[in-house]
Image: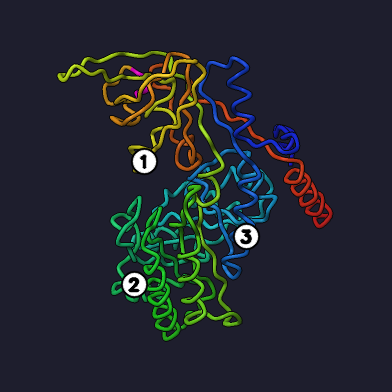
């Protein structure tokens, strides 16, 4: 893994947070990320412990940083790709095509042609028109029908755009059969950032029913893809969803039944691994009608940069004041604004904050999911750089895995 050379080693007993503070104290002025590589590795171990029968296929769209992909490739995850570009990026790292699912149910013809040539065999679908397209371009593909089963509460709802209604799935399978296509399984996605764990039981049960129905027309399904929706913030837990999934799989797809189970976690792996540090470059005092003051703080990142997650991922961010000035003033109402000339470029607020000064910093945790891939340079504002850190134990584990993988390839 060549990118391992770009990971800075944390001194014994030091954390990525302390490394961030050291960078701030060095006089840096630009907003920047700190990436804790060890957090991604720890998340992988947690997944394997709590969902041992479910293979993770990382959702590349969540954070397609080469560092993230290289680390996950070394750890042996699969990859959920949604475009030719994502497939190409993963394949360029040396990932085997069998470790990729092209999990976009509506694909441009050029993308289908690309994966056909590259040997990426597993593709999802949810409509009849897509079947005719695949039959014409890639008739030997291994297809997975995506059904709709929405969580009652999710950060991002996907069912309005993707997934065939369960009652309409069987006729779609009949069409696939008539076209001579090979459907190998069922997938679903309950919604990104799911907060309704029981939905997984309902979706897995519905998938079981479709497995049985498909058998009646000659299909022998061997793959179940339970999608994404797994939490990733530092204060979240995988336990509730894992309990529901494990129980449902035991009931409907027990070990030894011949069905491979995969999932598409994204934010679970990367959300908590990234921390963003932003500098207050300007400050504006506002006189309230009651005679008190409130403050507008302008930082060097905003909704066209890392905070695009506020609009596109429905994220809620929490500023952590990191003061460099010695002022000790009373808390006051404050709002935090991005650096562009767009009046909508507001990060958060109004909320009570200690009065900050120009040159102080706000730090934001849990910034690894659906942030950097969507950033742009509107108004000529730079996208924050990422500084990767890991302790010696993590680096040694990655080096050992990489060495073992190279030996196995000989």
Q: Which residues make up the magenta segment?
A: 336-340
Q: Residue 323: x percent and y percent?
A: 49, 22
Label 1 crowding class (10 Å Cα cut-off): few <14, some 14-19, many 20+?
Answer: few
The nearer-to-camera label among 2 and 1 is 1
Horizontal relation, residue 398 to residue 341: left or right: right
User: Which residue position is annotated with label 3?
Assistant: 98
Mark 3 vs mark 1, CA separation in Å: 36 Å
The residue to which callout 2 is attached is: 169
Label 2 crowding class (10 Å Cα cut-off): few <14, some 14-19, many 20+?
many
- Which quadrant would residue 285 be assigned to in this image? top left
Disc 3 and disc 1 in contact, CB within 8 angstroms: no
Q: Secondary structure at mark 3?
A: helix
Please check the rendered image and state whether residue 338 is part of the magenta-colored stretch, yes or no: yes
Q: Nearer the viewer, residue 33 or 142?
A: 33
Q: Residues within 10 Å of mark 3 (few under 14, many from 20)?
A: few
User: Is residue 196 or residue 138 the one in the foreground?
Assistant: 196
Q: Is residue 60 left or right of residue 284?
A: right
**What secondary structure is marked by label 1?**
loop
Label 1: which residue? Answer: 316
Relative to 313, residue 43 above or below: below
State the residue in front, 33 or 148: 33
Measured as percent of width and height from the top left, residue 259 is found at 56, 76
């Amino acid at each position: 893994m060549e990118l391992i050379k770009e990971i800075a080693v944390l001194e014994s007993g030091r954390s990525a947070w302390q490394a961030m503070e050291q960078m701030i104290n060095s006089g840096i002025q630009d907003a920047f990320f700190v990436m804790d590589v060890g957090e991604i590795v720890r998340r992988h171990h947690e997944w394997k412990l709590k969902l041992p029968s479910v293979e993770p296929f990382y959702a590349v769209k969540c954070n397609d940083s080469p560092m993230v992909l290289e680390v996950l490739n070394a750890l042996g995850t699969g990859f959920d790709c949604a475009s030719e570009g994502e497939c190409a990026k993963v394949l360029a790292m040396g990932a085997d095509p069998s470790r990729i699912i092209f999990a976009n149910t509506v694909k441009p013809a050029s993308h289908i042609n690309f994966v056909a040539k590259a040997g990426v065999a597993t593709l999802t679908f949810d409509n009849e028109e897509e079947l005719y397209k695949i039959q014409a371009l890639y008739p030997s593909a291994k297809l997975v029908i995506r059904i709709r089963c929405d969580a009652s509460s999710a950060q991002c709802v996907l069912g309005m755009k993707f997934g065939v209604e369960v009652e309409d799935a069987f006729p779609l399978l009949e069409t696939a059969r008539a076209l001579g296509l090979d459907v190998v399984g069922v997938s679903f996605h309950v919604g990104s950032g799911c907060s309704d764990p029981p939905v997984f039981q309902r979706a897995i049960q519905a998938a079981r029913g479709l497995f049985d129905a498909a058998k009646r027309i000659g299909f022998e399904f061997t793959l179940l893809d339970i999608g994404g929706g797994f939490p990733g913030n530092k204060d979240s837990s995988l336990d509730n969803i894992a309990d529901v999934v494990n129980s449902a799989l035991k009931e409907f797809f027990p070990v030894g039944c011949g069905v491979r189970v995969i999932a598409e976690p994204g934010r679970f792996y990367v959300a908590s691994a990234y921390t963003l540090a932003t500098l207050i470059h300007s400050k504006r005092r506002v006189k309230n009608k009651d005679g008190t003051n409130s403050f507008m703080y302008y930082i060097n990142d905003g909704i066209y940069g890392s905070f695009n997650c506020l609009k596109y991922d429905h994220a809620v961010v929490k500023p952590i004041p990191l003061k460099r000035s010695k002022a000790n003033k009373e808390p006051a109402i404050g709002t935090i604004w991005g650096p562009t000339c767009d009046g909508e470029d507001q990060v958060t607020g109004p909320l009570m904050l200690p009065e900050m000064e120009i040159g102080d910093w706000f730090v934001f945790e849990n910034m690894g999911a659906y942030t950097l891939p969507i950033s742009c340079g509107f108004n000529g504002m730079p996208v924050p750089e990422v500084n990767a850190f890991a302790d010696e134990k993590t680096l040694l584990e990655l080096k050992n895995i990489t060495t073992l993988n190279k030996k196995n390839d000989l």
